Image (cartoon, grey):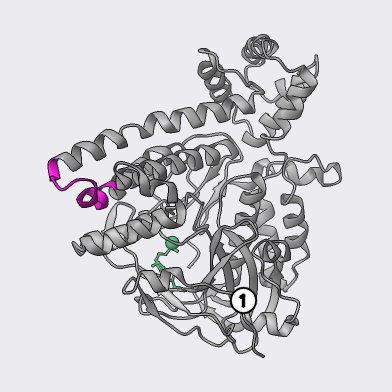
Amino acid sequence: MSVSFGFQHSYARELVGFYARVQPAKAPAPQLLLLNTALAEQLGLDLRALDEQALAKVFSGSVLPADAEPIALAYAGHQFGNFVPQLGDGRAILLGELVGRDGVRRDVQLKGAGQTPFSRRGDGRAALGPVLREYLISEAMHALGVPSTRALAAVATGEPVYRETVLPGAVFTRIARSHIRVGTFQFFARRADVQGLQKLADYVIARHDPELARAPNPYLALLDAVMQRQAALVARWMMVGFVHGVMNTDNMAISGETIDFGPCAFLDVYDPRTVFSSIDQGGRYAYKNQAPIAMWNLARLAETLLPLIAEDGEQAVALATEHLERFEALFGEQYLSGLRAKLGLVRAEPGDEALAQELLEQMYLSRADFTTTFRLLCEVAAAEDAAGLRSRFSDPARFDAWCQRWRSRAASEQAAPAEQAQAMRRVNPAFIPRNHRVEHALQQAVQHGDLSAFNRLAGILARPYDDQPEHAEYAEPPPPDSGPYRTFCGT
Ligand code: AMP
Ligand code: MG
């Protein structure tokens, strides 16, 4: 079998020394589990010549497309605040880049296809559960309209991987606008390699922000662009109740896509302090801390850019600081406009933030489910009666007062109530990857080799803003006795 994907290799060509050449391991018995044909089409990838066995070989790394040039990328990163000068792709292998039908260049990367020079003590493998989890959640994020890396394929390798227990191994094919992270910049900054940094920054500008090449200070403009994307991204996370869970600087993509789905999960009950990750004992990456942590990570990015921002060190620091200080306002705008949309408001009025905060506070005090509350509010927008939603609040009279305030504010908008409700349904999902549903689907797949629950859930999550009454139970929060949900880093 000889097949070509139409790969390009701008990273490998232009950033020599930023990666190691590697060979993926061969899987003993690769079996294709999932293939995202719609995404393949978008990428301009014609897979019709490959039968299922051939696809399994390609997407396990066992047989490479003729034009692949497998590499593992170097990067560093702050993990929970501690700097690690060398991390790198320890279990990910970039095969090449595809320029899709939309003209966008994207990386095609195998995750779990064996060791690389960056594996440290790791085995370079991935277990089936975390592979399916990333597939499901990254695609769900995309369907929710949140920028995210995508899932192209999942293949079982037929080989066991050894964690606390023996688990089936798998390889995940990830698609990203690039895999350049804050930690990529940190890798070169730590080595005081200013030339390398400049090459990297120029590459990023050419790939993600070509218009910035003409800016008066392109590297400061790059910092602004990354800040803008992160502010928008984290605000989107907040609007769907997403807790990333491991916002280390190596898990923050310069492209502004959500990346790394190891311990992430979605809020059920609205509590801003929510943490799911079992290793995040201090709550560093709690729901409410995500914007301040993004800001912290951006400060680490800014530090790496200092020598490029100005020759004079003090001037560089002053400029970078001045720009970084805008993050809070940038995020605040995105967050508030997201909340406004959730409440069906289009125009901006001074009392909007207080109006939204009052609802959130009542949700918090009532332990209300984040997603269902906002979805029910869509119905209330077009109805006289709010009884169904009202009953979910511990202080119904206080809710009534809020509801009246909201109704009169909403009445000052152009749109009629029915239109408002419709617009609200487009931003307040009915379906999110409910933790208990995700667990059940993964369990069926891993323990019984049965993907039917997974496929059903994935199908529902592909249309999160549609009512889908036939799947109403998938919109429901977990049973009240299910206890706190815990996640684990997907190694
Ligand atoms: P993550 O927690 O996925 O962000 O990974 C942090 C670092 O650990 C990255 O450098 C990964 O490549 C590396 N890593 C995670 N799991 C493995 C593994 N099973 N084998 C080798 N390296 C790994
Ligand atoms: Mg990572």
Q: Is residue 319 visible?
A: yes
Residue drawn at x 61%, y 49% as measured from the top left: 141
Please name the amino acid that badge 1 sits on.
Phe
Q: Position of residue 289 (x, y in %)?
A: 41, 39
Residue 269 sits in quarter: top right
Q: Position of residue 83 (x, y in %)?
A: 26, 58
Kindly state the secondary structure of the residue where label 1 is placed: loop
State the residue position of label 1.
5
Residue drawn at x 60%, y 89% as measured from the top left: 28
Side of 94 relative to 20 (left or right): right
Determine whether 467 is above or below 357 in the image. below
Q: Is residue 157 visible?
A: no
Tell which of 193 and 143 is nearer to you.
193
> Is the CB atom of the residue marked by disc 1 within 8 angstroms of ligand 1's nearest atom?
no
**Magenta residues, start to end:** 302-314
Tell which of 490 and 466 is nearer to you.
466
Determine whether 399 is above or below 295 in the image. above
Tell which of 6 and 238 is nearer to you.
6
Badge 1 local density, few (<14 within 10 Å), some, or many (20+)? some
Residue drawn at x 26%, y 64% as measured from the top left: 196
Q: Is residue 307 magenta?
A: yes
Residue drawn at x 56%, y 72% as measured from the top left: 127
Determine whether 249 is above or below 387 in the image. below
Image quarter of the N terminus: bottom right
Q: Is residue 36 magenta?
A: no
Q: Position of residue 288 (x, y in %)?
A: 45, 36
Secondary structure of the magenta portion, mostly? helix
